Every structure is written in C-alpha cells, then in structure tokens.
Amino acid sequence: MNIDLKNPRVYLAHEIRELVRDIEFDGPELLAMAVGGSVSRGQADAFSDLELLCFWDIFPDVDTRQKLVDSIGADLIFPIDDDQNEDNLILKDIQVDILHNTVDYYDNMIEDAWEFHLADYQTLGFLDTITYAYPLFGDDILNAWKEKTEVYPRELAINVIFDNLVKLHNGNIELYIQRDNPTEYYAQMVSIQRKLFNILSAINKSYAGGYKWMYPELEAMKIAPVNVSIRFKEMFTINKFEAVEDLYALVFETLILVKQQFPEVDFSVEETFDKFMIKRLPL
C-alpha cells in the first residue's frame, strides 16, 4: 500500500517539517526526517499515531530533544528519557512518536546486514521501516537506504529462516488444553505463528519487522500455504484441538516451501517436523 497524502497525520507531518527543518540546534544537526509506521504504509486507522523518524549527525541530548518539542508546540506524554531514543508527544490531538538516532548508526546497521547478513529483528525492523518511509527532508540519505532495501540478500533470508527453524517447537501446546490453561495455550500459539510468519516473510523477501500488520502482510504473500491468513485467525476461534491440528499442518506446509525455495538450506523436512512434534506424553 502507498501513503495516503490526504491523511491528517500526513498534513501534520508536513507542518512539523516546516517548523523544524531550519532550526539551529546547539550541537547536533538534524540531517533527515521521515514518516514511518502505519501512516507511511497507507494502513493507518482511527487509532494510529504519527511516527516520525529523526536522523542526526550525533545523537541529540535531552535539551536538543526538548527544543524540538517546544519548536512544534507539542506536549510531552512522558518526560524525555535520555536512556531511550523515542519521545511521545501530543499535538493537535494526535499522538506523535519521534524516534531519534544517528545516520552513522543506521549506515553501520545496513552495512552489517549486507556484509554479515545479520538476522536480528532490530535490523529487520529498520529495513522494513525504511522500505516504506516517506521522506520529509534529507531525501538523499533516505533514498540511498531505500535503494539498498530494494534487494533482499538471499543470504539474509537464509539466516532468518534458519534462526526460526532452530527455535521451532510445539511448546507442549496440547498440554495446556488438557490443563485448561488458555493463557499459556494462546501464548504458545502466538509464538509458533510468529516464527512461521518470520520464515514466510523471508521466503517472500519481506523484512516484516513487526507483527502489528501481520495479516495484511500474509495476505500479500505470493509464496505461502493456502489461506494462511484466514487459518491463523481461525485458530483463535475454533475448537482448540482442531486449531492445533491445523497449526501442525501449517508448520509442515511451511517447511515444504522452505525446501522448495531454498534447497541450499541444510535441513530435512521430515526430521525438522518430527523434532517440532516432540511433546510431553502422559504416564
């Protein structure tokens, strides 16, 4: 999806840009700013905030961040925490979350992803964010990053797949049905679904740095088990034993897709599935 330029949050983002782009801060320089999150994806709903990404030459101190807040006439929801890189504001009845970091920090993150194919989810989250980010200024910086994210390294996909395969286990999910513990049952269901989502995202060359918009991502995937999005949702409404059986089926179907699309990944579908199915048996 593309950004909706008529969204009032986008209008607000442009107003903020005009207020901050020419401010001279004492020390740090704001090199680029972009809209991120659901607004940049064109998926914002009535509950969405405005996520602004601020890229600096050096990390801004509390005084610099406060000056930015004051310059746009916003109110802080929480006091600025210099141990965090996000400030939460209210401006014109819209929550605005401003994320701060340096251009060098993200340059190095991207280089590590391309050189070492690191599969950590902070990196994947940033690559996903940049893919959809809507530049407000500093287009040269953002477009250089965007150019890189257009090509998803196959080695990175393999590492994401492998990282999730080795952690794939049924979590004794059926045990929690027998114990009538729906909280732990659904926790295990979510954990397994997320690992499958990560694997399918890598197969489809999508960075998918989070789970808030998992279902639209699943629906857009060209390589995935049949009706995977619907099946994920139904697991929370149908009979638990039936849900688990379909969960097991989805795991097997996903393993088949990995073997088809990434034959160089050294694993056996049958052995991996058998390992996944190891469970505690009653005496």
Image (cartoon, rainbow, N blue to C red):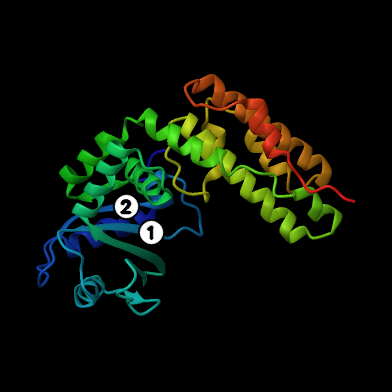
Task: Specify which label sits upstream in the sequence, 2 or 1.
Answer: 2
Q: Nearer the viewer, residue 163 or 11?
A: 163
Q: Is residue 41 visible?
A: yes
> Tag 1's secondary structure?
strand
Q: Secondary structure at mark 2?
A: strand
Tell me the residue at 56%/34% (across/down). Answer: 219
Q: Return the residue at label 1.
A: 50
Which residue of the protein is positioned furthest toward the bottom in this rendering? Answer: 79
In depth, the one of 86 and 153 nearer the eye is: 153
Residue closest to the far front:
283
Q: Where is residue 79 drawn, in percent x and y?
A: 35, 80
In the rendered image, which quarter is residue 11 located in? bottom left
Q: Amino acid at mark 1?
A: Leu
**Quarter-of-image position of residue 152:** top left
Kindly identify the residue that appears in the image at 40 percent across and 50 percent down: 39
Amino acid under disc 2: Val
Number of residues whose C-alpha sits closer than 10 Å to that of mark 2, classed few (under 14), some (14–19) or many (20 or more): many
Q: Residue at x 36, y 69 (%)?
A: 92
Give the percent coordinates (x, y) of residue 37.
40, 52
Residue in view at x 53 percent, y 36 percent: 199
Badge 2 vs badge 1, beta-carbon distance below 8 Å: yes
Q: Is residue 140 left or right of residue 6?
A: left
The quarter of the picture where the N terminus appears is top left
User: 216 left or right of 25?
Assistant: right
x%, y% of residue 130? 32, 45
Residue 226 at least partly seen: no
- Looking at the image, residue 257 sits to the left or right of residue 72; the answer is right
Compared with 105, 208 (above or below) is above
Count of marks, rendered view: 2
Callout 1 environment at 10 Å: few (<14), some (14 to 19), or many (20+)? Answer: many
Relative depth, front residue between 162 and 39:
162
- What residue is disc 2 on? 35
